[in-house]
Each structure stands twice: as C-alpha cells, then as structure tokens.
Image: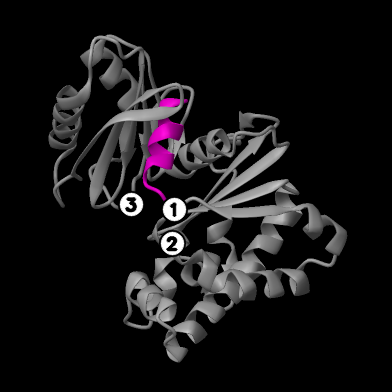
Amino acid sequence: MLLGIDIGGTTINLGLIENNKIVKKLCVPSFRQGAELEETLVHLEDAIRQIITPEVKSIGVGVPTFVDAEQGIAYDASNIPSWKVVHLKDYLENAFGIPAGVNNDANCFVLGAAAKLGKPSKVVVGVTLGTGTGIGVMIEGKLYNGVNCGAGELGTVPYKDGIYEDYCSKKFFCSKGLEPKEVGDKAFAGDPEALKLMDEFGTHLGNLLALVLYAYDPSDIVFGGGVAHSFPLFKDAMYRSLAKSYPYPSFLDKLVITAMPEGDIPVLGASLL
C-alpha cells in the first residue's frame, strides 16, 4: 500500500492507494496563512498520522513549487511563504521510517493521469487549469523533470500583455471579477455571456497547446484542475484555435485530448513517485 499527498492552497488531500486505486481518503485544511515552517511540517505530519497504516510502504507528496526531486527539497513556494528551502523527504523519512518522494504538483498530476489512461502512450502532457497553469511531462512512461524540475513551466511564457497563465487558468476569470465555477454553471445553463467567456478561454488555451505541441509533440494531453470541469464548454473553441496555431493537421488528428478534473488524480500520481 502507498500513501499519496497533494498539498494545495486550500486543502491537503491524502489517499491510501492499492493497485492504483484509492481505498481511503482524508482531506484537511491547508497550512494557516503566515504559518512558520515548523508549524506547517507538524500540521502535515499530524494529517499523515491520521491515515497512515503499518502496511504503507512509501509516501509521495506533490507540492506547488520547484523541487529538487532527487533530494526531495522544495524551494520558494509562492503560496507558502515560510517554505524557502524545505528538506521534506528527509523530514518525512525521519518521522515515519519509510521512503518518501517529493515532486511538483503538476508532475504528480501527469503521473496519475498517465496511470488512469491505462494505455501505453509515448508522450503524455498533463495541464492543470487551477489557480495557475501547471504542466507535467511523461516520456516513454517516465516523468521528465528537467534539471530543476521545471520542464513544463510554459505557463510563464510571455503572452499578450502578460503570460499564458494569466489567460489559461482561474486568473482569466478572476481578472473579470468572476469565479470559474460560477461562469461554468451559467454556461452549462446556456447563458450567452458565460458561453462567450468560455469560448474566449478556449481560444487562449488553444494557443498554449500549440506551444505544448511544438515543445513536446505529445500523443496525449490531459487537463486537470478546477477549470477542467468546464472542458465541454471550451473544447470547441480550443480546437479551432489550436488548428489555426499549429499547421500540421495530420498530427492533430492523432492527438488525444481528455479532461480528468477529479481531485484524486494528483494524489494517485504522488503515490507513484
């Protein structure tokens, strides 16, 4: 049995995994805003002790920042101010006496998504559409971290008057004073203005996917994160935009794009580190 953990800005999700299936879940509030490092580590350890069993062989943690994946060190987490240099792997291994792995949350998502696809895929790219835009890459069944665990950070590439993340995440809707779930609910109900916003979002996302295709030439792209719940609403505009931005239609015909917005996917991926 494995333990997977996904540390988010609002919640920390934990799951016991057996045969790639979550058999028990736990969700606790994330770290208190302004918490010191020691307080965050104690909070995480307490949450783990609520769910861990003697059968657990290893712990995997997805964190929202850059990571030294070999050493299990998290650096400069923007939404956890006290996390400048966190030796998380060492801390967990000392606390629980079993191996621990640490990686970026988008990388954990693509690991879980690839496992859920249940098929051999040469290159899988996971794109998380949440508070920001995260991208993880798997090549020939192996996670591609790059040197600094930043191989998929295309959301920070300049785009229009900002970066892609400003237009391809929750930030797009928040910049208009709206919540993506609110827009999605209205669009599913047929609201014209909400549908127009979803089309606009899909257009921007299609441009980002063209960049993904140029960089990684994937066989599969999988969307995660809260905004991915609205995939049916922005899918058509996304495909139209992608077809304009990427001039190789025969490649697009073979590309498979799906959405896995379930919160269990990053937890599953973290367990596989």
Q: Which amino acid does label 1 sit on?
A: Pro
Foreground: disc 2 or disc 3: 2
Q: Which amino acid does label 3 sit on?
A: Ser
Instruction: State the quadrant of the N terminus.
Output: top left
Q: Residue 4 or 260: which is nearer the viewer?
A: 260
Residue 269, x across and y down, in percent:
46, 33
Q: Residue 261 carries which label?
A: 1
Residue contact between numbered discs 2 and 3, judged by CB atoms under 8 Å: no
Secondary-structure class at tag 1: loop
Residue behind mark 2? 229
**Neighbour class for label 2 at 10 Å: few (<14), some, many (≥20)?**
some
Residue contact between numbered discs 2 and 1, judged by CB atoms under 8 Å: yes
**Neighbour class for label 3 at 10 Å: few (<14), some, many (≥20)?**
few
* Residue at (42% x, 87% y) in the render: 191
Residue 7, x across and y down, in percent:
30, 41
Q: Distance between the residues labelled 2 and 1?
A: 6 Å
Residue 265, x across and y down, in percent:
43, 41
Residue behind mark 3? 78
| 101 left or right, relative to 52 | right
Compared with 33, 24 (above or below) is: above
Which circle's residue, 2 or 1, is located before the other in the chain? 2
Q: Residue 94 or 117: which is nearer the viewer?
A: 117
* Highlighted range, magenta: 261-273
Q: Residue 83 carries which label?
A: none
Which circle's residue, 3 or 1, is located before the other in the chain? 3
Secondary-structure class at tag 2: helix
The answer to if 137 sits in the magenta stretch is no
